[in-house]
Image (spheres, helix red, strand yellow):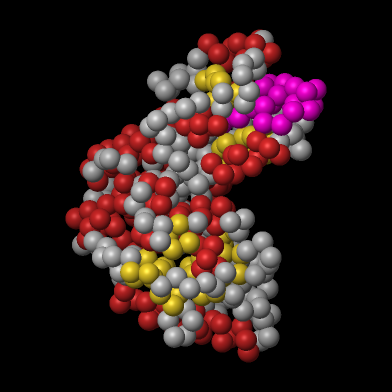
């Protein structure tokens, strides 16, 4: 369905591919990340089960009573927020089996559906795509002069990429990758995301499973997650953080259940640990690195504007890391790679590990300023040396992704330096 205002997404390629492979494609992700527009771009007809006003439409009842009517229409047919009528899953599976045709349906959903009424996994019939908020390349804030694929293949990337303004970089963190915020200033973005969070707490979490949760404690947990963005803190540490900072008590079981609910709404996007045994004698930590789906959420919760982050470059560094890792997940997915982080009990860390589909891996350090590039490169070289000493599997490529570098190049020691504002898939 043609839309002249549609800004193309990296996931477009995957949607096209999956429509050829599967009878139905499911696009999942947080609200307002662009799922409907992505699905609409590839569909020939549509039906919306959830209104932008926050209310379910009459189409939900229609879907439950007469699903065959909802499925009528030119294919591919978009069914937006399908999880409002989970009986559609089996109906679509049956129709796909009956016709044997590919690319019949596109389903979008902003929460993990309850399995009630779903009798079949849909394996072989449905292809799943996870859509995040926009990367800097998708939003037009990265020139795309450097390809992650080229870097991971060890190719030459020497490019003059231009000066980067620190205030602009901080603004991009605060604004986030929400398609509806691309033209907002930092204060407008903060207000938008703050209202987004309020809607999640006041409405979406209740609609998720009907469970009434303590809103005050939810906000305290969100605040603690924001303070611990880009770290590997445990659930128990989150509980202690709430107690120490906000003088409120919450048990670990409640923390866990609330985190699970936020995860089902796709608000969390933690980075899993790299589990490949690259160093035989060193125990690797198995904690996930904490991330919201977009760094703008942490900024809104902590009410951080450009001036505040300019005066707190430590916090700015963690949030910059979150933005870069958001982009790396998007770019890596486009080249059939996966993102992890590495942290061991010997004190060695790698901000991001990208594992390629051939089993090789690449190590990335993330630094805001050019003054930290040398330290980051030395860290990577030491880790590589330690792995070699133990006859382990060394990284295929090592790189430092920087905020303020004005060129992309490969150092004499083989380590890439890449400005995030020049990177693409």
Res 53 seen here: yes
Q: Is residue 105 magenta?
A: yes
State the residue in front, 384 or 21: 21
* Residue 368 shows in this picture: no
Relative image position of residue 152 (x, y in whole percent):
55, 68
Decide whether residue 327 is among the magenta residues: no
Residue shown at 38% from the left, 39% from the top: 179
Image quarter for residue 396?
bottom right
Find the residue positioned furthest to the bottom: 389
Is residue 143 found left or right of 232 in the rendered image?
A: left
61 or 126: which is nearer to us?
A: 126
Q: In this rendering, would 356 be left or right of 307?
A: right
User: Residue at (65%, 17%) from the top-left corner?
Assistant: 71
Task: Give the total number of marks visible in the rendering.
Answer: 0
Q: Position of residue 268 (x, y in %)?
A: 49, 47
**Front in this rendered view, residue 221 or 29:** 29
Taking depth in this image into account, of 93 and 197 the one nearest to the observer is: 93
Please tell me whether residue 185 is drawn above or below residue 359 in the rendered image: above
Residue at x 54%, y 73% (from the top left corner): 154
Q: Can you say whether 223 is above or below 407 in the image? A: above
Q: x, y (%) of residue 313?
A: 27, 65
Question: Residue visible at 27% across and 47% down?
Answer: 303
Residue 202 image point, x, y percent? 41, 30
Magenta part of the chain:
87-108
Query: Residue 424, relative to residue 375: is it above or below?
Result: above
């Amino acid at each position: 369905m043609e839309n002249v205002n549609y800004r193309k997404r990296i996931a477009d390629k995957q949607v096209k591919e999956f429509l050829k492979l599967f009878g139905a494609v499911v696009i999942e992700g947080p609200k307002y990340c662009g799922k409907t527009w992505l699905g609409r771009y590839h569909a020939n007809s549509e039906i919306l089960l959830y209104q932008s006003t926050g209310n379910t439409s009459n189409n939900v009842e229609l879907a439950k009573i007469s699903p065959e009517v909802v499925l009528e229409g030119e294919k591919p047919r978009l069914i937006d927020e399908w999880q409002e009528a989970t009986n559609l899953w089996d109906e679509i599976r049956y129709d796909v089996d009956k016709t044997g045709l590919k690319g019949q349906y596109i389903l979008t959903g902003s929460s993990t559906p309850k399995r009630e009424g779903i009798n079949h996994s849909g394996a072989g019939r449905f292809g799943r795509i996870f859509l995040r908020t926009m990367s800097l390349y998708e939003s037009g804030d990265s020139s795309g002069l450097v390809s992650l694929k080229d870097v991971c293949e060890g190719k030459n990337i020497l490019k003059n990429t231009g000066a980067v303004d620190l205030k602009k970089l901080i603004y991009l963190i605060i604004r986030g990758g929400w398609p509806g915020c691309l033209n907002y200033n930092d204060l407008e973005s903060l207000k938008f995301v703050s209202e987004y969070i309020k809607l999640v707490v006041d409405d979406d979490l209740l609609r998720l499973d009907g469970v009434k949760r303590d809103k005050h404690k939810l906000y305290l947990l969100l605040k603690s997650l924001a303070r611990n963005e880009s770290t590997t803190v445990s659930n128990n540490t989150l509980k202690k953080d709430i107690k120490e900072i906000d003088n409120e008590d919450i048990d670990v079981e409640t923390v866990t259940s609330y985190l699970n609910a936020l995860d089902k709404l796709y608000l969390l996007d933690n980075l899993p640990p790299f589990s490949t045994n690259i160093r035989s004698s060193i125990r690797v930590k198995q904690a996930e690195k904490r991330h919201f789906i977009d760094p703008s959420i942490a900024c809104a919760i902590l009410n951080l504007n450009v001036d505040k982050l300019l005066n707190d470059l430590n916090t700015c560094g963690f949030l910059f890391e979150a933005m870069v890792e958001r982009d790396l997940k998007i770019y890596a997915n486009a080249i059939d790679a996966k993102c992890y982080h590495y942290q061991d009990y010997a004190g060695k860390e790698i901000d991001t590990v990208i594992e390629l589909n051939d089993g090789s891996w690449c190590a990335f350090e993330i630094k805001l300023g050019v003054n930290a590039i040398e330290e980051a490169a030395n860290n990577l070289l030491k880790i590589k040396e330690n792995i070699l000493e133990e006859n382990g599997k060394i990284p295929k490529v090592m790189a430092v992704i920087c905020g303020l570098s004005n060129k992309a190049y490969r150092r004499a020691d083989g380590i890439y330096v890449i400005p995030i504002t020049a990177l693409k898939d």
